[in-house]
Image (cartoon, coloured by chain):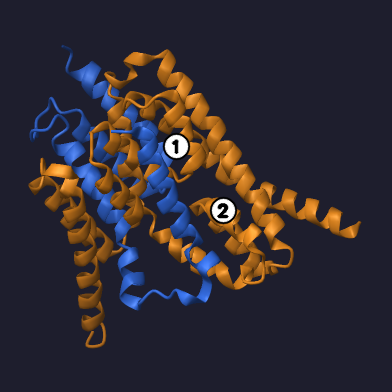
Chain colours: A blue, B orange
Amino acid sequence: MNHWLAIIGMMLLTVLIRASFLVFGQRLAFPDWLNRALHYVPPAVLSALVVPMALAPSGTVDISLHNAYLPGIIVAALVAWKSGKTLLAIVISFAVYGLWRWGLLPG
Amino acid sequence: MTHTVNRRALLLEGTRDTVPMLVGAAPFGVIFGTLAIAAGLSSATAIGMSVLVFAGSSQFIGVSLIGAGTALPVLWLTTFVVNLRHALYSATLLPFARDWSLAWRWPLAFWLTDETFAVVEHRFRTKGAEGGQWYWLGSSLAMYGNWLLWTVVGVSLGQSLPGLANLGLDFAMGATFAAIVAPQLKRRPALGAAVAAGVVAMLGRGLPYKLDLMLAALAGVLSGLLLEQWAKRKEPSA
């Protein structure tokens, strides 16, 4: 895949969306259902990416002690949910992942 | 004379009000740069993505899709879906910016991130938008410079430690997404959207062109809307 082509496309889409109302103004109006639908886009897309990473990090489902991704990602979600602090959640989950992978299950 | 002073003051005020956001965005710039290298991007394309796209969450997702060899139309469709919320920011700020020239509105739109939106919207709503394009510009340039700086730091980190990917840096992507999404799930329809999307993503694993991601996103959004509708209907009788 041509990475630059990918990036140019991403740029055009991003700037057009951000410019939508600011540049093209009042001619645009979203119907109410679309406005409400937009609220669910981030949780849906992010979960669709995260869940397979946690449950099947190497492609096949792995719900065992050998899957360090699962406890790490669960901890990331729990800490962020409780504290609202994204970065804290990431740091703690790194520690859990590292300990699990290289501390608890050597080899 | 007064105008020059005013502009500079507004520019600085916009920059200053954005400082807390800079601290929050910095580690994500580093993580992005490192992951982009681990996903197989060159340093030029990794930095180029920050220069040209300048959208944190879609850059993260974009890099993970590029690393997985996703087809271009799906990558672009995903970018579009993930960034659609920015149209809401654009609509919210339009009443303040209506009379500004296009030479202002285009670049300010390019720089319209979640962080700058939060800062600028608050300022305009509480203190008005007189001369606000300079305030907005100050916030934008601070965010942009900050993002580029930390991307470069991440890219050089990724290059000097080429083994990082095998050390589980792809885990960083999963943990980052999980930490971003979890606080958004306190309302039941949003939680339902996440669960539906997760289930469909698991069932659809391996579909060509990452169609699994698109189907999962669609299932999630529909579930969220349905649950919201359902909660509304129950409310009056309760």
> Image check: A47 left or right of A30?
left
- Residue at mark 2: B116
Which quarter of the figure is the N terminus of chain A placed in? top left
Observer-nearest residue: B103 or A33? B103
- Determine which quarter of the picture holds residue B158: top left
Which residue type carries mark 2? Thr
Which quarter of the figure is the C terminus of chain A placed in? top left
> Image check: B175 left or right of B2?
left
Q: Earlier in the sequence, mark 2 or mark 1?
A: 1
Which residue type carries mark 1? Met
Residues at circles 2 and 1 in contact by the CB criterion of under 8 Å:
no
Q: Secondary structure at mark 2?
A: helix
| Residue B74 pos. (x, y %) | 25, 47
Residue at the image point whose x is 43% and y is 30% from the top = B46
**Tag 1, which chain?**
B
Crowding around mark 1 (Cα neighbors within 10 Å: few <14, some 14 to 19, many 20+) is many
- Residue at mark 1: B49
Residue at the image point whose x is 56% and y is 46% from the top = B21
**Tag 2, which chain?**
B
Q: Secondary structure at mark 1?
A: helix
- Determine which quarter of the picture holds residue B134: bottom right
Number of numbered discs on residues: 2
| Relative vertical location of residue A23 with respect to residue B111 in this rendering, above or below | below
Q: Nearer the viewer, mark 2 or mark 1?
A: 1
* The residue positioned farthest toward the bottom in the image shown: B237
> Image check: A63 left or right of B227?
left
In this view of the protein, can residue B176 be seen by the observer?
A: no
